[in-house]
Image (cartoon, helix red, strand yellow):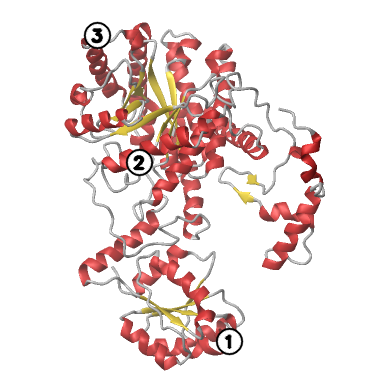
Amino acid sequence: MTVPPAELELAALFPQASREAWQKLVLAVLRKSGAAGEQADPADVEALLATATYDGFAIRPLYTAADGAPVDSGVPGHAPFVRGRRAAGAVGGWDVRAQHTHPDAKTTAEAALADLEGGATSLWLRLAPAGGIAVETLPDVLRDVYLDLAPVVLDTGGDAVTTTAASDVLLALAAARGVAPSELVGTLGADPLGFVARTGAAGDTVTAHLDEAARLAERVAASYPGVRTFVVDATPYNDAGGSDAEELGASLATGVAYLRALTGSGFDVAGALGQLEFRYAATANQFSTIAKLRAARLLWARVAEVCGAAEPDRAQRQHAVTSAAMMTRRDPYVNLLRTTIAAFATGVGGADAITVLPFDARLGLPDDTSRRLARNIQALLQDESSLTRVIDPAGGSWYVEALTAELAEAAWAFFTEIERAGGMAAALASGLVGERVDATWARRREDLALRRAPLTGVSEFPNVAETLPARAPAPAPGLTGGLPVRHYDEDYEDLRARSDAHLAATGARPVAFLATIGSLATFTPRATFAANLFQAGGFDTPNAGPGDDPAAIAAAFAASGAKVACLCSSDKVYAAGAAPVAAALRAAGATHVWLAGKPGERADSDAAAGVEGYVFTGCDAVDVLRTALAKAEVA
């Protein structure tokens, strides 16, 4: 609808904004905060605020129409499918896919039925060795499921031999129930290269599994038009700590390998493309997730075009699952926030099917409540947040469009590097993929340790006294030996586990005493910061309260039972009060003393008084906490 100019008078009252004016205003703020010096120029602002990614490009603080359109996004439902596989885009919703892995067939059957009655539209069954469901129990697991209404996705971790056995059971079950082959919909889950990524299997195993999967695809394609044989599962690369571009590049190389295998066994290009479904991890970095799904469709459309596919056959079918790597054990209810953001991003990004992992997935097998919450997150997004009323919610965002283009370029570079190395199987065998992912994990791990990438409830705002929900143990991983399975919280989890063990052995948690100096208003900011940091390692953090008498502070330290301490106050108070308090703490038996703040001109006098380290924004929190546990004599 065209709005008459007369109704826009309010906007006309304000001066037109310019990029230059914004830069000047931001520069003033940066100078005030100390992030920019007096010599800085307004043109430097965007570089100062840019954020580096793990994929070699920077995220700028501002994107506008002046930057130009980075890619031709086309229109929804048409190549290059950046804006969605379907012309209707998000309108009509997506497939709500519920994951199940419980080894007891009766329990899984009841849970699957509850999911379908509660809003799920398909089932993802994780079979042994990838999960806990035994192949022979599939008829019991699916006893109440209408196979012509609810698509079923099988997942054996990519093991093509087990996939064939499971597929035979599923297809026989459908036939026994009188389901017409044309009405059966699902994905069988053959993923030979994903199996190699998880297990490190040798090259001859890859060949055998590819041949087995291709034979299964031939049988399926002849009679079951709604069933796909292969899944290109890129989540192992996210689980190993890899970047978005690495996940995308690996998926492209894997997809190309499967196209070669299928066309080599007699499929035409269109038929081969129709046998593939792609699975990606969705993280709480919502814009990166949106861009990743858009870039994946763009890149796959280009691959399919080069292979000679007609436009409708170039569209990539996507299944997105909330990232397992980002899920935490501690304060698990925060996972509800993480998965909600990730699910929102996948819906906006245009995924065809979405799985939200239950918030308690790191604790064991989910219960009825956590599965219901996982379903309801998607119900809220689709039905109450009106996300499915807009064809392409992200379309036209200068930030999203630019991020999509830069991510696609980085992913294409990794894909072509893999191809030059001989393809995905060779790149996995040579260690090329593993080394690249390990390097990214090292950078990510550093960001987590320095709390540049904060984890709420873990590295920030931890709840040391929490009682974790009790859950039945999940089945032990059946696929190991390949890429490692990592979690963003693992370094902090190791620290908290040591604290838990200390509590079990002694009846008390380790203590980090906060030697507060001066008035409440003076020491509270740094005491709060220090308490937050030490609690991330499972420490109790009593403080001395207001006062500046070194003897009184040392007495409070001794009474707390602590072995380590941290001075907390302002720089002005530190100038006269830090050294005597540190010395008193040492005399009272402190094995290590930190100071909350950055070392400055007083560093030498601090050291002479017994201060051995500093805690501040940007310090290595994991290193500080490891030292603190060791000095507190926690094994």
Which residue is under mark 2? 373
Instruction: Compute the Cα span from label 3 to label 2.
Output: 34 Å
Instruction: Compute the Cα span from label 3 to label 1.
Output: 84 Å
Rendered view: 201 above or below 176: below
Image spot of residue 312 (x, y percent): 55, 13
Q: Is residue 519 visible?
A: yes
Q: Earlier in the sequence, mark 3 or mark 1?
A: 3
Give the amino acid at mark 2: Leu
Badge 3 element: loop
Rendered view: 424 above or below 493: above
Give the amino acid at mark 3: Gly
Q: Residues within 10 Å of mark 2 (few under 14, many from 20)?
A: some
Would you say the residues marked 2 and 1 are in contact, meaning their CB atoms lie under 8 Å apart?
no
Instruction: Compute the Cα span from label 2 to label 1.
Output: 53 Å
Would you say the residues marked 3 and 1 are in contact, meaning their CB atoms lie under 8 Å apart?
no
Which residue: 40% across, 91% down?
Answer: 552
Q: Earlier in the sequence, mark 2 or mark 1?
A: 2
Which residue is under mark 3? 178
